Amino acid sequence: MKKKKMLKWLPNPLLIQLLGVILFSVVLINPGFSGPLELVHFKSYAEILGSSAADSDSSPDLFPIWGHLGRPEGKGPFPAVILMHGCGGIRPPHFQWAGILNELGYVTLTIDSFRPRNTLRVCNNFARVTSPPQRALDAYGGLSFLQSQAYVIPDRVGVIGWSHGGIAVLHAVNRSGVSARFKQQFKAAATFYPWCMTDRSFEIPLLILIGESDNWTPAELCESLSDHSKNAVSGIPLELVVYPNAHHSFDDPQVKIPYLLEDALGKKRLLKYDQDAHLDSIKRIEIFLEKNLAE
């Protein structure tokens, strides 16, 4: 008699966060994940722009953002990639991705948008202080920081985001959105399982990777966005990859045993690793970045 696969239901997200903090500490002291990491500080671009959000002393934008910097071997200069975590904050898989990119010759900056604002996770709430539009400004703060470093090629910086961070990336590179406020621009962008807003258009290469069976961020929305980008009067059509039978967090080996996570609406969302999709996504990211960031 075959045993049914059981889904782990973790009703207390603090348990997940506690495990994440423990593993996060292991990552920082174990250079086997992505090499030595340097903690760097910079400011969210909200303050640099002099926005109304920065006018109040109580605004979280008056506090520095920080990130974890990874560098390839050698003096450079190198192209660079900013990494934007999901609603659960920075987790070991983000550092694994950073390590992969460092090995491929890219500087990486894994931005922590949450803890500088006294937040650990937002998977089950609508925290405005860490909303995707605000995090898009964090990405531009990171871009400014990287472009000021001698070991970075300033006009070859890309950005990758996961889930909540993927939504932030779509905000950041939307041609009629916040990107219009900046002279400095990202060279290319990629997102993993974002919530796709179907009326956006883009002037830089964009890659979206999502699972067909994702019940948190529907692939259908990204397909509609892809169709919109192909039919738009201006902008560049995006590249969309939909993995058959794959779910949210398909590139996260920590969810090899799938589990359900409650979102801000009280609905249970399935997180499940898919090795085939994960390995394919690594190849696609490598090809995409080589085409758009490398010489």
Image (cartoon, rainbow, N blue to C red):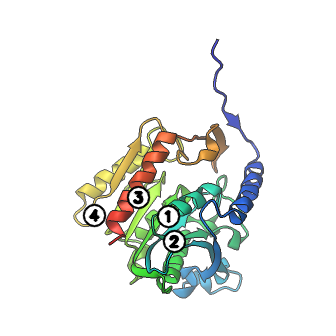
- Nearer the viewer's eye, disc 2 or disc 3? 2
Say if mark 1 contacts mark 2, CB within 8 Å: yes
Quick one: label 2 or label 3, which is nearer the N terminus?
2
Mark 4: secondary structure:
loop
Q: Where does the C terminus fall, quadrant-wise?
A: bottom left
Classed neighbour count for the residue bearing mark 3: other residues with Cα under 10 Å, few (<14), some (14–19), many (≥20): some
Distance (Cα) linking label 3 and label 1: 11 Å
Residue 232 percent across, percent down from the top left: 25, 60
**Amino acid type, mark 4:** Ile
The correct choice, above or below, for 45 with respect to 67 in the image is below
- Label ID, residue 236: 4
Which quadrant of the structure image shows residue 43? bottom right
Distance (Cα) linking label 2 and label 3: 15 Å
Q: Which residue is mark 1?
A: 103
**Amino acid type, mark 2:** Pro
Mark 3: secondary structure:
helix
Classed neighbour count for the residue bearing mark 4: other residues with Cα under 10 Å, few (<14), some (14–19), many (≥20): some
Residue 101 can be seen in this image: yes
Which quadrant of the structure image shows residue 269? top right
- Label ID, residue 72: 2
- Label ID, residue 8: none
